Amino acid sequence: MSRINSIVPAALIACIGWWAPAHAEDEKLVEIRIQGNRRIESAAILNAIKMRAGDTLTGEKSDADIRAIYKLGHFQDVQAVKEESDKGVVLVYLVQEKAIVREITFEGNKEISTDKLKEALEFRLNSVFSTKDLAKSVGKIKKLYGDDGYYLADVQTEAKKTATNDMKVLFKITEGEKILITEIRLDGNKAFSNSKIKGLMETKEKWFLSWLTGAGTYKEEVLKNDALLITDHYLNNGYINIKVGEPVVKLNEAKTALDVSIGITEGEQFKIGAIAFKGELLDPEASLRAKLKSEPGSVFNRSILRTDIGVLTDVYGDKGYAFATINPLTKLDNEKKTVDMTFDVDKGELVTIERITIAGNPKTRDKVIRREVRVTEGGLYNSSGLKRSKQNLMNLGFFEEANVATAKGSTSNKLNVNVDVKEKPTGTFSIGGGYSSLDGFIAQGSVQQANFLGLGLKANLSASLGGKSQTYALGLTDPHFMDTKWTLGGDIYRSEREYTDYSRKLTGADIKGGYPISDSVGTFMMYKYELKDILKPSATYQLLSDADINGTYPLGETTTSAVYSSITHNSTDYRMDPSIGFINSISAEYAGLGGTNKFARFITDHTYFHPVYKKLIASTKITLGYVAEVGQPIPIDEKFYLGGIGSLRGFQSRTVSPTSILFAKDINGNRTNERIYLGGEKEFFGNIELTFPLIAEAGLKGVLFYDYGNSFTDTSKAFNPLLTSYGFGIRWASPMGPLRLEYGIPNNPRTGIDSTGGRLEFSIGSMF
């Protein structure tokens, strides 16, 4: 046996070659063997090399094979050995396999679990051992500790090889004490106070609740981003020459805390000078300028400039110029401290939509999605239409995600639109219970499908049974009847409800329709027919006679034949959970197309949502209502009642209305006075709310509110008194349905009706 070049490692063989004897050029191989492998099959190695028995042995071929074996990734050393046999030359590749990690252990970790540490490793059990991966793993473990405040955590490793060439890896961790940032020093800021700038930063100083909030923890990438946030703030306030130095983090001498220093060079504040346009203008300059938020004389704001660029891009995009570029050219006047801005427009080619493809919808029919897309195949590109398409799809409530993106078409002036959705369950079957402050405990069962047959049909079959109410309903609605924009549907229903001073049984049916004027404005129409029976309540107190009741409101069976219509404007961003925009509606109902009940009712409702800070959402709502007689008294149950979780929280449900006192008797026959609630012919109420996430991923929110309003008949008593309340609560999109738990406190409780303290209102489950 002879070893080629004294068994030189492959890397060296590749550099100097090993084939020296000239007579060996014509040696033929009779066999190629693999030795030293335990885990990797010889056949797998032989399959990776090119030389075969019968080939002429050369140094170049052997070098190439050695490199090929190395590329398999399983070997730390490969050598070539030439052996002479009776039959001829045998080439042997001696391989040394890399060690395999068979055991990973940790010592000293208390603050971070072993499972979390294992997730940070660059290698896993039964993987090839690498010193490079080991070093990377140490760095990632240290970062994990650093992100939790254990800045001085030390990680030592021991890698031991067993007799079978396997590896045992041990991580010895010394966690040390938690070290937090106790001071953030700002140097050079004059325009904005330290507290203002620190408020912009995600990195915070240590305080007594740091154990709960995590304030004071040093994270390198977060602190670097804080420098960018500070820069953005200055640029958005006219300081175009702002320079924010890289944060410097130092450990104090006692090694118990971190100090952060950030240097700031503000420069001078600049205002906007002249605003001009050039290039390919499709609209007059005055029209384009009117669309901008930037104004001459105002403080320069980079954020507003970006918004203006987006607005101008959309102006061109809405006319089919998908690749329009708006280049803002700025000219500084250091003496006047102004910035002249010229928007240079290159409109590019006119682009059409070639093809619209839809993916991710195994259940929902393509046509249900296509009818929400606001661009058409063969039509011009429209940027606002694409944005609206995504919003429309999400507002359906059928999808967890809806992405609308463009891709290159067959030519430079054509684009394809790819609509990719991720469906979510839209049908529910539930048997359960709930509670509301009005109806008490409720047993319910329901089958609901918001996307019936994948056609977008809305179907429901439901029932609820409570201590004071029973409701049954069956309905079906097609929001695009016969593939048109018309909505058509119908319901049949029956309910029984017991109020304080009367009970009502109701059986009815309706047919309803609607037509959208635009994506944000829709109309709705309905005809309903109801059989109604007003009864005395089965309560502890009973009125003395039916005559007493009939003097206030009639008992007995009646019928209602009514038409209802409304128009609604909804400009909110996401209708399931709005954060910005308006909802305005006006409705009118007339009862008197047959039937015994006659009245006319008008209601206008307005709600506005606006983000205050990040996910802190403010909203305000006001509702005005009026119901009028049409030749006869208004039915008692058609009047307005306020109070409770749906209107004035803190006031007892349905008690905010005109009242009357009648003689009654208790179960022992003793005479007493009984307050009855007559309902108002007019109402107005509203609220101001602040909602904020508590546990965002679970859909749990907090709410602060202020309510006001009244229900009345005599207009002079509209504000006498104006009832107001305030309070707080939580809201949760629970598996059983929306949950509301709210505590309202009346500012002016009414004697004999309201509690002087607060009232807890609670509802959960779908209410039909």
Image (cartoon, grey):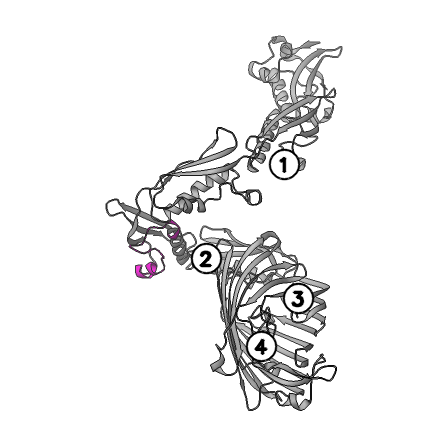
Q: Which of the two labelled residues, at mark 1 and mark 2, occupies the earlier sequence position?
A: 1
Picture quarter with the N terminus? top right
The answer to whether the residues at label 3 and label 2 have Cβ atoms under 8 Å apart is no
Q: Name the residue under label 2.
A: 383
Looking at the rendered structure, the number of numbered marks drawn on it comes to 4
Name the front one of labels 3 and 1.
1
Question: What is the number of the mark on residue 111?
Answer: 1
What's the CA distance linking mark 3 and mark 1? 43 Å
Report which residue position mark 3 lands on. Answer: 766
Q: Nearer the viewer, residue 551 or 613?
A: 551
Would residue 375 be seen by someone viewing this image from the given angle?
A: no
Q: Quadrant of residue 445?
A: bottom right
- Residue 248 in the image: x percent, y percent? 44, 33
Q: Nearer the viewer, residue 637 or 541?
A: 541
Q: Examine the rendered structure and indicate whether residue 736 appears above or below residue 345.
A: below
The residue located at (30%, 61%) in the rendering is: 286
Q: What residue type is labelled 4?
A: Tyr
Q: Where is residue 60 in the image (x, y as percent from the top left)?
A: 59, 18
Mark 3 vs mark 2, foreground winner is 3
Residue 676, by quadrant, is bottom right
